[in-house]
């Protein structure tokens, strides 16, 4: 479309007021993009959000007026339901569109670009008829920051628009400032045809297609946030790609400040697969949060700095209770802006979710419609009152535990990076790597986790998930690891650690309480500053009993027994060797471009384990290694 035609179309379809807002941004390629999708998707109305308080308020109200959200008993609280079969990320229908000759490898879902573009454009033809289109601008990362990426979102879901206003920093002024030099990401979403509950109906045509070349993501016939909120997981994919070209990293990590002795704050970033304790770690009482899901990492002056491209939380609600999560609990019970999704709503318009530790379960409505205990789905399975992937959405600026550097354009200096998974039988609860290369390979690239309800499919299967980022990788896995290894070649890279909150003993019981992670974090903080010693095992450096004993007392007022310590920190040689074999097999058969160094580091670890087994047997208690 030429410039004249673009302007004519926009004037006609947007109306004078919205057109004026749009041309406040003098960026022809932005106008062309918008005109193209207004024409293709054919909405009845278009609303342009320029981030003014009135525009933000309008979207909030529209979400209720259009029936995509219902008001709850507490002022500012609303609930949104996704279709019963649209409750998680749809990995099967999320694909990269690749030009001929580009291959991302076996583990990454992709298809031919031309074919995919044709399919998605056919699906999107007239898809917004009868709907209002919302056009929004965001900034991934703090304003005025070298880290940040501007973006435009087109969506016909006011729930998606509303969520994004809570989760992302405004971008209208940022785009205005950058003008024609802005290199922005583009997102087009449509919930498609809606049923009587205002949930996406045409799930057979649910598609999430990522065009890396154009840095554009399309999402159709779905509402679940992980499939639709462009700035969240959809933006991670082009961001990983861009980062790989520019020498920085886009990671599936929280960022938090851990408060050490004498007012010292040390920042950590932690990568965990979905539903493995990432949000709850970043929200630990006494610490401060910068982010709970995504981080952009860059080198500055020989050290790693990080920002959160988001400013809000789209968190799992299952298990959130007053004792373990007092800060979130408060927001979920007092007047403020929160969107609940896929919880149970009782007749009194109160939300209920599994694990809230309240015994007020009543009939109500949930993601399946009217619900009463014992209700079954079409396959005869009992429907839980709230979905295991039910969530809450809120702006972190409301939280008293937000870190003072949340919006710092320079980011925060990372003392440590952690990798954690759901591992019932192998890894000790907390461990430091021998250095950047060992940490990246043995703790990041070799990360395994048991699957959860955050993606569609079977739960509880052990799967490898490099850096917890596999679902979002838009470059071949080998190149991603190569980039990581190169990224650490700086004067003072962060220390790398692994954590595992899910280790079980031989009887199948968890070896730790949920709250113990507070102690691991304090140990990590001291360890970064080399204020505690560690014991060298074949797999890494583990805490000493005396240090943990002190910390358990100070942090949780708990008496920590030597017996618990031994159970938790025994090196399980056979399990570690089995893990190595599985992971190596994965890299040998699935990853065509694994760096040779990965296999070398695997082999070194194997040899250390075998040697230790000869000396100490299959289960090595920390005592023998410390010589105590
Ligand atoms: C995750 O599943 O990792 C999330 C939620 O953080 S989603 O938006 O679905 O990705
Ligand atoms: Mn996530």
Image (spheres, rainbow, N blue to C red):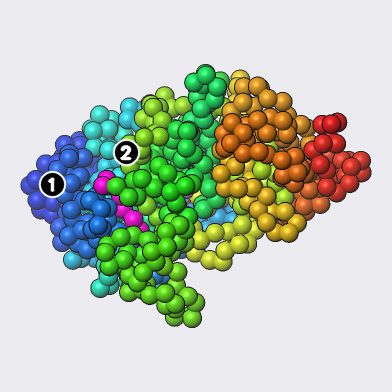
Q: Which residue in the structure is indicated by mark 1?
A: 18
Q: Percent x, y for residue 205?
A: 38, 69
Q: In the image, residue 228 lies at what x, y percent?
A: 36, 55
Instruction: Residue lying at the far left in this picture: please name it.
Output: 16
Q: Nearer the viewer, residue 153 or 435?
A: 435
The answer for how far apart the CA atoms under marks 2 and 1 are is 30 Å
Q: Is residue 175 above or below residue 104?
A: above
> Magenta region: which residues?
335-343
Residue 421 in view: yes
Q: Is residue 106 left or right of residue 615?
A: left
* Residue contact between numbered discs 2 and 1, judged by CB atoms under 8 Å: no
Q: Residue at x 53, y 48 (%)?
A: 277
Residue 398's disc number:
2
The foreground one among 251 and 150 is 251
Looking at this view, is 374 or 236 the one in front? 374
Identify the secondary structure beneath mark 1.
helix
Q: Residue at x 73, y 59 (%)?
A: 507
Residue 341 belongs to magenta span: yes
User: Dot 1: within a 10 Å radius of its alpha carbon, few (fewer than 14), some, or many (20 or more) residues?
Assistant: some
User: Would residue 419 be seen by someone viewing this image from the given angle?
Assistant: no
Q: Earlier in the sequence, mark 2 or mark 1?
A: 1
Q: Position of residue 524 (x, y in %)?
A: 61, 31
């Amino acid at each position: 479309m030429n410039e004249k035609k673009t302007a004519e179309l926009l004037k006609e379809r947007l109306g004078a007021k919205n057109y004026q807002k749009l041309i406040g941004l003098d960026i022809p390629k932005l106008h062309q993009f918008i005109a193209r999708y207004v024409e293709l998707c054919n909405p009845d109305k278009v609303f342009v959000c320029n981030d003014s308080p009135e525009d933000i308020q309008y979207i909030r109200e529209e979400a209720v007026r259009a029936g995509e959200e219902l008001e709850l008993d507490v002022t500012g609280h609303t609930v949104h339901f996704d279709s019963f079969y649209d409750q998680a990320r749809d990995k099967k229908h999320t694909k990269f569109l690749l030009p001929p000759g580009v291959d991302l490898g076996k583990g990454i879902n992709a298809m031919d670009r031309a074919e995919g573009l044709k399919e998605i454009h056919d699906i999107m033809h007239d898809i917004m008829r009868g709907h209002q289109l919302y056009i929004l601008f965001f900034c991934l990362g703090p304003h005025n920051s070298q880290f940040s990426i501007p973006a435009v979102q087109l969506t016909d879901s006011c729930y998606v628009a509303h969520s994004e206003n809570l989760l992302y920093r405004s971008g209208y002024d940022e785009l205005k400032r950058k003008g024609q030099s802005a290199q922005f990401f583009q997102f087009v979403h449509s919930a498609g045809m809606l049923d009587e509950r205002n949930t996406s109906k045409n799930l057979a045509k649910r598609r999430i297609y990522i065009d890396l070349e154009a840095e554009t993501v399309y999402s159709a016939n779905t509402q679940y946030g992980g499939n639709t909120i462009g700035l969240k997981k959809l933006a991670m994919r082009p961001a990983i790609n861009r980062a790989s070209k520019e020498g920085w990293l886009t990671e599936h990590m929280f960022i938090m400040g851990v408060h050490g002795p004498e007012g010292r704050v040390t920042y950590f970033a932690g990568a965990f697969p979905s539903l493995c304790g990432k949000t709850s770690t970043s929200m630990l009482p006494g610490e401060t949060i910068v982010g709970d899901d995504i981080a952009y990492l860059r080198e500055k002056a020989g050290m790693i700095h990080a920002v959160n491209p988001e400013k809000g939380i789209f968190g799992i609600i299952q298990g959130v209770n007053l004792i373990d999560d007092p800060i979130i609990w408060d927001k979920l019970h007092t007047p403020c802006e929160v969107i609940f999704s896929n919880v149970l709503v009782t007749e009194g318009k109160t939300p209920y979710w599994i694990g809230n530790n309240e015994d007020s379960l009543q009939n109500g409505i949930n993601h399946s419609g009217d619900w009463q205990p014992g209700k079954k789905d079409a396959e005869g399975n009992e429907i839980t009152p709230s979905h295991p992937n039910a969530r809450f959405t809120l702006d972190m600026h409301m939280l008293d535990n937000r870190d003072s550097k949340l919006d710092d354009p320079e980011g925060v200096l990372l003392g440590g990076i952690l990798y954690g998974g759901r591992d019932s039988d192998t890894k000790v609860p907390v461990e430091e790597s021998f250095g950047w290369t060992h940490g990246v390979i043995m703790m990041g690239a070799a990360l395994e986790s048991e699957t959860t309800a955050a993606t569609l499919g079977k739960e509880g299967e052990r799967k490898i998930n490099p850096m917890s980022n596999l679902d979002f990788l838009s470059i071949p896995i080998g190149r991603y690891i190569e980039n990581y290894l190169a990224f650490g070649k700086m004067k003072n890279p962060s220390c790398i650690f692994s954590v595992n909150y899910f280790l079980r003993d031989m009887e199948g019981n968890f070896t730790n309480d949920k709250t113990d992670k507070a102690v691991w974090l304090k140990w990590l903080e001291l360890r970064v500053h080399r204020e505690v010693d560690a014991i060298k095992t074949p797999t890494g450096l583990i805490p000493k009993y005396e240090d943990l004993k002190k910390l358990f007392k100070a942090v949780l007022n708990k008496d920590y027994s030597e017996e618990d310590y031994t159970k938790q920190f025994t090196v399980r040689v056979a399990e570690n060797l089995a893990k190595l074999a599985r992971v190596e097999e994965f890299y040998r058969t699935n990853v065509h471009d694994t760096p040779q160094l990965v296999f070398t580091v695997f082999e070194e670890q194997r040899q250390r384990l075998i040697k230790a087994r000869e000396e100490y047997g299959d289960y090595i208690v920390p005592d023998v290694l410390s010589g105590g």
